[in-house]
């Protein structure tokens, strides 16, 4: 018997020798308060009840001596990861979890903690999660991230059908919009009515409108970074829905359990037959769109992961209400544009404090504008496009209160400005504008450090270098004359790959936080950003087919200086937040168009535009409630933006006589409120209210009668405003109405956009009727839009 007992003891000892014990405590990195019920996941498997911290934040894990990936997640905090292998030993850890920055989360119950809105040395940073996006009322019941961020202070647009947003005095092309590190050049469908991302694929949305980390470059105003969710490695899941406008579906599944997973998410709209029922003017409008994402995740081992992502979208819009291509007499105009992006990302964990992230991105945007000829019905197309190859690599180090990131990137850009393809149409000539080539290089470093309990600083430095490349022809002009065909003094032809012009410089980024108390802080920041790629357009808001242009010898890059200061307060256990921010931006070399400018098929666009500077300033006040059955926020923004353009003393190179004038998106006063009320587990109501000043437009001061025709006379650009804009939206979300816990659940979303049917004006235009001039208001949504959507989930 003793030999049997001895054998069992030896066997048991060997088994225990193959295990290690990891124990310790999970705490808030700022306040050091313990985090109760933090969830542990081992090797990407589902959480279980026994893998949670106790009420003191303590935990204990027993693991085999193999490769393991352990993640810790807690609502409102950045997930924490650590790894073990066959050489790991038992140890005790203190894990400090970092709160998310200013997250507008909708949480019913959460552990009280000090608010990172107060503690973080960053200004003008907002994060909205998918749960919040899904509850914000929107037109036609579609989840829309662009409309969601317009409920935040400092974010606006020129109207309901605008192709993008304006952030703190910036133009739409000054915003860098990323989807899993891939750039998006047209963020909307149907000329601004819907955003372009399958909503169920979105994980988080980060908006940087103040302190922009140095890893971002190439834009002068802000960064909108959308993260897509990773596929599940353990379970099959399907999520979908159908609404009046579109249908959507997401399907994800593990390919190799705990190792490889993949999902597809898509949305499409093919219901344009309903448009005539909304308005008789839409009888001849044809429109459809779709978008899709495929994402795969491979956990190679405990130290390496590989992610592959493909994103694509396509739009088609045809109408007889818009103008035709130049010199083409047509019965209808159509717009056909598509995006196709690829991204591969490799993450290598060097040790528990250091990792390496390397990625390659290929981005492609192809817009087409065309006209259908009156008689022959042949299609005449104007093709253009933008292609980019982007290489990035960065090292990320974090230990204690110090977080350091450094890296480099390289971007190759190719722009096809325009090719007119006549097809079978007679009398239309083939025209092709030369392709533009450029390279942009960047190297950066970011560091965040807490010097004392009161003082914390984030500092970044980026150096960017840009080269405009041939082949191409570059003109020189008489500097005392307006740029046109008559002021050309010479030209030079460059071979393919030959350097035409170089630009570059340092881009410092700085933020500082000083605590006045545990719940009150003061912050200040400064950003310098350079932009080498811009839109040239003569419309109030750029359309999807607007022309992109690289900087060259005649068009200088835009440079933005942003100064920000703010005060922040959190109270009642992080249930409420208050903030007050002020900013001042000076942007040099902004682009505006000359009167009568036309950029279509223009070989030398510098003759149609002028450069100057823009001044923007504003104050943003925000109050938010983040926890409980009633959550939401309200904010007020006072903001002004003025442009001033006088390239030369020649009147043709000036806008508004060289005097300052209001930008198209200058809206002095904006008030937003977004509220979500959770009645019970299955029902919630949401309300949006928006009130803002009307945008500027140019109003004629008189009319000239020439040969019995009246022509408007303008003495100042943007000298008047359209009427004040205001709107109330409502939505009712019914989750799992059967009230049964099962694998398949459904929910209904009922929404009303523009509840009280206010006829908001998008623009004001003038027409000559019976020998007199009359003003008219163009409205996009002059009546309530009632929508009903059904969404389901199976897992």
Image (tube, rainbow, N blue to C red):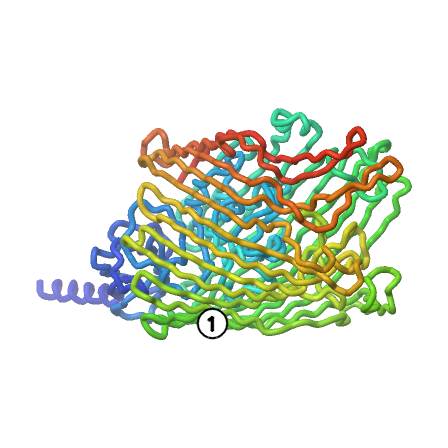
Q: Quadrant of the C terminus?
A: top left
Q: Is residue 707 left or right of residue 758?
A: right
Q: Residues within 10 Å of mark 1 (few under 14, many from 20)?
A: many
120 or 239, nearer to the observer: 120
Residue that label 1 marks: 459
Question: What secondary structure is marked by label 1?
Answer: strand
What residue occupies the far front of the structure in this picture?
A: 702
Residue at the location (71% across, 29% down)?
284
Q: Quadrant of the N terminus?
A: bottom left
Residue 391 visible? The answer is: no
Q: Is residue 293 left or right of residue 108?
A: right
Residue at the location (50% across, 44% down)?
199
225 or 104, nearer to the observer: 104
What residue occupies the far left of the structure in this picture?
A: 1
Residue 168 visible? The answer is: yes
Residue at the location (63% across, 53% down)?
662
Q: Is residue 531 left or right of residue 693?
A: right
């Amino acid at each position: 018997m003793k030999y049997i007992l001895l054998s069992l003891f030896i066997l048991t000892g060997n088994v225990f020798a193959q295990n290690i014990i990891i124990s310790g405590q999970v705490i808030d990195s700022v306040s050091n308060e313990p985090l109760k019920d933090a969830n542990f996941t081992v090797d990407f498997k589902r959480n279980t009840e026994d893998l949670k911290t106790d009420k003191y934040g303590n935990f204990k894990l027993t693991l085999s001596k193999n490769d393991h990936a352990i993640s810790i997640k807690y609502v409102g905090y950045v997930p924490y990861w650590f790894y073990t292998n066959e050489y790991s030993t038992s140890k005790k850890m203190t894990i400090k979890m970092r709160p998310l920055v200013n997250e507008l989360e909708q949480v019913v119950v959460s552990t009280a903690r000090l608010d990172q809105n107060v503690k973080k040395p960053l200004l003008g940073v907002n994060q909205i999660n998918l749960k919040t996006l899904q509850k914000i009322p929107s037109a036609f019941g579609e989840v829309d991230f662009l409309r969601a961020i317009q409920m935040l202070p400092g974010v606006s647009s020129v109207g309901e059908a605008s192709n993008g947003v304006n952030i703190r005095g910036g133009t739409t092309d000054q915003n860098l919009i990323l989807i899993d590190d891939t750039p998006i050049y047209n963020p909307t469908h149907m000329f601004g009515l819907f955003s372009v991302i399958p909503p169920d694929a979105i994980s988080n949305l980060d908006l940087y409108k103040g302190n922009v980390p140095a890893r971002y470059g190439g834009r002068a105003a802000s960064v909108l970074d959308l993260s897509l969710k990773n596929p599940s490695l353990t379970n099959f899941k399907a999520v979908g829905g159908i609404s009046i406008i579109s249908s959507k579906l997401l399907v994800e599944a593990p390919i190799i359990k705990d190792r490889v997973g993949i999902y597809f998410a898509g949305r499409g709209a093919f219901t344009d037959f309903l448009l005539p029922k909304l308005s008789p003017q839409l009888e001849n409008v044809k429109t459809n769109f779709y978008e899709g994402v495929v994402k795969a995740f491979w956990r190679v081992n405990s130290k390496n992961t590989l992610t592959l992502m493909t994103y694509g979208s396509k739009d088609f819009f045809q109408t007889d209400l818009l103008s035709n291509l130049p010199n083409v007499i047509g019965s209808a105009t159509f717009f056909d544009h598509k995006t196709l992006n690829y991204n591969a990302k490799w993450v290598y964990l060097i040790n528990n404090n250091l990792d390496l992230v390397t990625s390659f991105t290929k981005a492609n945007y192809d817009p087409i504008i065309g006209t259908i000829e009156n008689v022959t019905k042949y299609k005449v197309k104007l093709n253009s496009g933008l292609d980019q190859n982007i290489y990035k690599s960065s090292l990320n180090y974090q230990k204690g209160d110090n977080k350091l990131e450094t890296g480099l990137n390289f971007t190759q850009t190719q722009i096809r400005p325009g090719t007119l393809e006549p097809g079978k149409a007679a009398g239309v000539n083939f025209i092709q504008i030369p392709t533009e080539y450029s390279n942009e290089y960047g190297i950066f470093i970011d560091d965040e450090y807490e010097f004392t309990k009161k003082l914390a600083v984030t500092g970044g430095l980026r150096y960017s270098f840009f080269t405009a490349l041939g082949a191409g022809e570059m003109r020189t002009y008489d500097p005392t004359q307006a740029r046109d065909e008559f002021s050309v003094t010479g030209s030079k032809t460059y071979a393919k790959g030959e350097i035409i012009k170089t630009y570059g410089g340092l881009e410092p980024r700085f933020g500082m936080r000083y605590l006045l108390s545990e719940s009150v802080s003061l912050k200040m920041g400064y950003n310098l950003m350079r932009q080498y790629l811009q839109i040239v357009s003569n419309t109030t808001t750029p359309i999807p087919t607007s022309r992109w242009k690289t900087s060259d010898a005649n068009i200088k890059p835009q440079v933005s200086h942003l100064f920000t200061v703010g005060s922040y307060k959190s109270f009642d256990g992080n249930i409420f937040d208050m903030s007050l921010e002020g900013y001042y931006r000076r942007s040099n070399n902004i682009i505006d168009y000359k009167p009568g400018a036309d950029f279509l098929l223009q070989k030398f666009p510098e003759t149609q535009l002028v450069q100057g500077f823009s001044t923007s300033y504003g104050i943003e006040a925000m109050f938010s409630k983040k926890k409980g059955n009633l959550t939401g926020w309200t904010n007020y923004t006072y903001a002004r933006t003025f442009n001033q353009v006088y390239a030369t003393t020649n009147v043709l190179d000036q806008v508004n006589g060289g005097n300052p004038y209001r930008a198209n998106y200058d809206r002095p006063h904006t008030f937003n409120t977004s509220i979500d009320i959770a009645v019970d587990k299955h029902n919630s109501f949401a309300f949006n209210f928006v009130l803002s000043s009307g945008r500027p437009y140019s109003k004629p001061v008189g009319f000239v009668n020439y040969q019995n025709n009246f022509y408007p006379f303008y003495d100042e650009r943007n000298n008047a405003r359209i009427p004040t804009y205001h709107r109330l939206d409502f939505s009712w979300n019914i989750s799992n109405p059967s009230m049964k816990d099962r694998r398949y659940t459904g929910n209904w979303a009922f929404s009303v956009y523009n509840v009280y049917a206010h006829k908001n004006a998008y623009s004001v235009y003038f027409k000559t009727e019976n020998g007199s001039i009359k003003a008219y208001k163009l409205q996009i949504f002059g009546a309530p839009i009632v929508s009903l959507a059904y969404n389901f989930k199976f897992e």
